[in-house]
């Protein structure tokens, strides 16, 4: 048990070398060494024995994993960059124009220090990546592009940047952990500036004495050497700016910050400093941490970065809704990812780490992941590597069984071949996988149409975010929900002009989709191309119908009522004219009031623009629009579980993800204390055979760790634990183990020894008893150490009610 006393000792694995005596080894050992080398070469990927997977299939899984994660990480990086492009461009302009604008400012006793306040949000774990991105943007000579520029404008911009060489800024990032005081803050800043790879950096000496590494004169001399022209182009050379980023402003010592900002302000005439402060909360932290004398030296400007929740929505939309990647995430794992993001720290980096684990586990443990390839065709090598185990896994998939069940009603012979013929199944796999990719692309386009339809109406209470709509679609509850019929009812209530605008925008949305680009032949057309023709036909017929309605035939409902009243007035006395006059006055009054009745009347007059002869055709056209919208949602927003072999491209295992990213420390600790053999894997801690039905206290072994012994005695106690009784029981268990280690002399030897033997045995027994007797100080020390560990882990606490007792805090096992 001595080798297991410490649970925190590091264990290192050193692979055996294959050089030197490797030539004399047998062929089997050489093959084992080669297999071990391949194991490390393939990032831990192993052959899956349950399907008798060949090595080539394992290599394909490893290659697909690298390709898929490179694609995902690249897309995520592009999304993050595009989300903050406008803000990064504004920060770049602020830094590079900080001192060019100050020539026109009023004369002041001191010069204000340009300071940018960057509100990065409360997702502190993502701030390292964010501020590194800001530092790279500022130090670059070309600003980030804020839009699509033409070729001529890009060339002109690049030529202007080349003409103003030397205008790049030097950036350092200061964190609170490196700036405990003013000296360490200045030292960290100077070391980072001087360590930027400047050739020929001088070693300043003042009055024959070497300057300290935290002296600002060191930075001043270095900056002077940096600004000296070395190629005769000093006239066009712009002086660089020194940018200091205070990443976690709230964590800095405010006294240190006050002195640091004051020193930078005093050196501003000789060194152009620019401060960028990262704020996680609000600007109140700045006003509470710095006094007015320091704040007056700052010329501040605010920069609001994108919120992490918006970045997460953009990542989900780009990766999964638009299906730019091959591997998708099922509803339960996606819900777990989003819940962990919301309930913990709003970290996009944590979301990316969890997503990488999902991708890794899918390709590492799923033998069918060799088919998760967007470019899978009938000539792919992966199809030739499928074994009998792969076919068995395919036929056990729920989606495949549902597909075969549907085939039984249509083509029983084909369904039988799918179950019995492996070659026929291999021929069908590429079509099924490509059909799944086709479903993803169509789903993304119609989902965009659903979002477009929801954004047409300003009823904020019934709007749902994109993440919620996509999650409903993954669960299969979107098309059967009341949200889509309600949107359709709003479309049916549009007037003719609004309906025409809606159809025009609908057609434009489909035309701008990459799925509806013009094809060279009709054989290359997809389902969305045909849907585009349907929408275009609806638009043309509606435009023709509204164009045929002349201005003379357009009669509002109020005019119809006026004509009816005129006809009645010609047959009646002057009272009818009074009624007509009241209607006219009401019509005039409708434009001057905002009452509910007059608004409804105005809407009725605006919508009744179609004559009675064309009203039937318009009604049929509106009905066709409603049926088209319903068909699009019903066909293309169907749940992914209806597609065959969807398990190949959808990760839906939630248990492993929860174990990896939702740990239960109490359960792990209780398992380690109650069953130490699970973690230590030693025979001395393993309970004897036939003790399965015994309680935890009956399985206390003296060879186990002291904390485990105390814990097993702890679970048998009540709310208050007497320390002396606990100590006595602990000492008895240790004494029992000490007695079991002693070896007693056999009885035959005792009888043969005679009197001398009996006297000698008595002396030996007494010596053994003294040797086996435990030292009370050692037992007490071990008891105190174990109790302290249990108190540190939260199992007990001291109480003032009884000084010789402790209070139990946990009940039951997890």
Image (cartoon, helix red, strand yellow):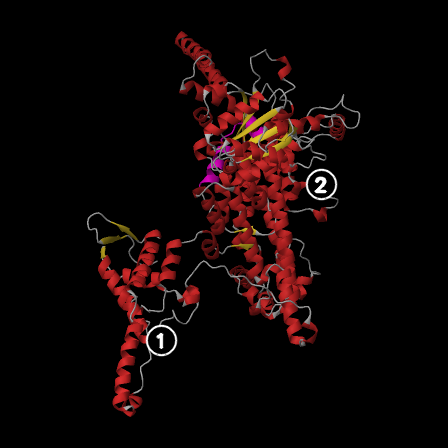
Q: Residue drawn 77% across and 28% down?
A: 230
> Secondary structure under badge 1?
loop
Examine the rendered structure and indicate whether residue 810 appears above or below residue 510.
below
Q: Could you tell me how many numbered marks the image carries?
A: 2
Q: Observer-nearest residue: 131 or 373?
A: 131
Q: x and y percent of residue 619 in the render?
A: 53, 33
Query: CA gap, disc 2 to disc 1?
Result: 75 Å
- Bin the neighbour count of mark 2 within 10 Å (Cα to Cα): few under 14, some 14-19, many 20 and up: few
Q: Quadrant of the N terminus?
A: bottom left
Q: Observer-nearest residue: 753 or 304?
A: 753
Q: x and y percent of residue 69 in the render?
A: 61, 50
- Bin the neighbour count of mark 1 within 10 Å (Cα to Cα): few under 14, some 14-19, many 20 and up: few
**Outermost residue, left side:** 801
Examine the rendered structure and indicate whether residue 645 appears above or below residue 537.
below
Examine the rendered structure and indicate whether residue 771 appears above or below residue 557.
below
- Considering the whole magenta stretch, tell me its main secondary structure: helix
**Outermost residue, right side:** 232
The residue singled out by tag 1 in the image is 689
Can residue 245 be seen in this snapshot?
Answer: yes
The dot on residue 518 is: 2
Upstream in the sequence, badge 2 or badge 1?
A: 2
Q: Observer-nearest residue: 594 or 254?
A: 254
Q: Based on the displayed image, in which of its 4 quarters is residue 676 positioned?
A: bottom left
Examine the rendered structure and indicate whether residue 765 appears above or below residue 83.
below
Seen in the image, is 307 located left or right of residue 707?
Answer: right
> Secondary structure under badge 2?
loop
Can residue 476 be seen in this snapshot?
Answer: no
For the record, the magenta segment spans 482-501
- Single out the mark in the foreground, 2 or 1: 1
């Amino acid at each position: 048990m001595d080798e297991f006393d410490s649970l925190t000792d590091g264990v290192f694995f050193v692979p055996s070398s294959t050089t030197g005596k490797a030539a004399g080894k047998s062929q089997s050992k050489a093959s084992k060494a080669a297999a071990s080398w391949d194991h490390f070469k393939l990032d831990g990927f192993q052959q899956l024995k349950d399907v008798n997977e060949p090595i080539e299939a394992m290599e394909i899984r490893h290659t697909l994993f690298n390709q898929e994660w490179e694609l995902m990480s690249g897309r995520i990086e592009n999304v993050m960059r595009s989300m903050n492009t406008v803000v990064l461009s504004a920060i770049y302009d602020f830094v590079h124009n900080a001192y060019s604008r100050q020539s026109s400012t009023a004369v002041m006793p001191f010069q204000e220090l340009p300071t940018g306040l960057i509100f990065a949000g409360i997702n502190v774990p993502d701030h390292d990546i964010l501020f590194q991105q800001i530092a790279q943007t500022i130090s670059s000579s070309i600003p980030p592009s804020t839009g699509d520029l033409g070729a001529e404008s890009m060339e002109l911009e690049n030529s202007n940047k080349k003409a103003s060489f030397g205008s790049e800024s030097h950036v350092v990032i200061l964190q609170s952990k490196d700036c405990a005081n003013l000296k360490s803050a200045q030292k960290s800043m100077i070391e980072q500036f001087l360590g930027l790879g400047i050739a020929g950096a001088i070693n300043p000496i003042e009055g024959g004495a070497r300057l300290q590494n935290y002296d600002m004169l060191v930075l001043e001399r270095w900056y002077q050497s940096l600004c000296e022209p070395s190629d005769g182009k000093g006239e066009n050379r712009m002086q660089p700016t020194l940018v200091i980023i205070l990443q976690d402003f709230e964590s800095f010592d405010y006294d240190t910050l006050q002195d640091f900002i004051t020193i930078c302000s005093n050196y501003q005439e000789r060194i152009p400093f620019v401060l960028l402060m990262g704020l996680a909360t609000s600007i109140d932290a700045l006003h509470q941490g710095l006094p007015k004398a320091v704040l007056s030296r700052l010329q501040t400007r605010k920069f609001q970065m994108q919120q992490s929740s918006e970045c997460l929505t953009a990542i989900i939309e780009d990766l999964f809704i638009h299906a730019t990647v091959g591997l998708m995430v099922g509803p339960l794992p996606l819900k777990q990812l989003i819940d962990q993001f919301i309930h913990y720290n709003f970290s996009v980096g944590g979301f990316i780490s969890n997503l990488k684990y999902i991708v890794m586990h899918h390709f590492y443990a799923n033998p069918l992941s060799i088919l998760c390839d967007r470019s899978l065709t009938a000539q792919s090598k992966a199809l030739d590597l499928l074994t009998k185990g792969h076919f068995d896994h395919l036929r056990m998939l729920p989606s495949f069984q549902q597909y075969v069940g549907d085939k039984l009603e249509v083509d029983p012979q084909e369904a039988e071949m799918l179950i019995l013929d492996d070659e026929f199944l291999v021929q069908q796999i590429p079509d099924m996988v490509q059909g799944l990719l086709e479903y993803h692309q169509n789903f993304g386009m119609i989902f965009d149409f659903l979002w477009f339809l929801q954004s047409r109406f300003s009823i904020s209470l019934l709007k749902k975010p994109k993440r919620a709509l996509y999650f409903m679609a993954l669960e299969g509850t979107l098309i059967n929900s009341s949200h889509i019929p309600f949107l359709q009812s709003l479309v049916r209530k549009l007037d003719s002009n609004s309906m025409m605008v809606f159809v025009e925008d609908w057609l434009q949305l489909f035309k701008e989709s990459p799925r509806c680009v013009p094809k060279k032949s009709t054989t290359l057309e997809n389902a969305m191309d045909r849907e585009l023709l349907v929408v275009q036909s609806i638009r043309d017929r509606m435009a023709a119908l509204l164009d045929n309605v002349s201005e003379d035939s357009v009669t509002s409902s109020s005019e119809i009522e006026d004509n009816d009243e005129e006809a009645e007035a010609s047959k009646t006395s002057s009272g009818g004219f009074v009624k007509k006059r009241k209607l006219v006055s009401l019509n005039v009054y409708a434009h001057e009031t905002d009452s509910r009745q007059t608004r409804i009347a105005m809407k009725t007059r605006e919508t009744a623009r179609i004559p009675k002869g064309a009203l039937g055709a318009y009604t049929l056209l509106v009905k066709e629009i409603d049926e088209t919208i319903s068909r699009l949602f019903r066909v293309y927003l169907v749940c992914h579980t209806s597609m065959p072999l969807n398990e190949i491209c959808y990760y839906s295992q939630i248990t492993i993800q929860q174990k990896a990213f939702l740990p239960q420390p109490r359960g792990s600790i209780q398992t380690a204390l109650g069953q130490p053999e699970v973690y230590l894997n030693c025979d001395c801690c393993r309970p004897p055979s036939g003790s399965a039905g015994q309680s935890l206290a009956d399985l206390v072994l003296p060879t186990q760790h002291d904390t485990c012994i105390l814990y097993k005695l702890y679970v048998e106690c009540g709310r208050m634990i007497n320390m002396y009784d606990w100590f006595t029981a602990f000492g008895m268990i240790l004494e029992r183990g000490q007695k079991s280690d002693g070896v007693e002399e056999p009885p035959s030897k005792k009888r043969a020894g005679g009197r001398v033997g009996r006297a000698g045995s008595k002396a030996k027994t007494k010596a053994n008893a003294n040797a086996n007797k435990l030292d009370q100080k050692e037992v007490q020390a071990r008891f105190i150490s174990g109790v302290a560990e249990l108190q540190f882990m939260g199992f007990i606490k001291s109480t003032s009610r009884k000084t010789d007792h402790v209070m139990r805090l946990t009940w039951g096992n997890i």
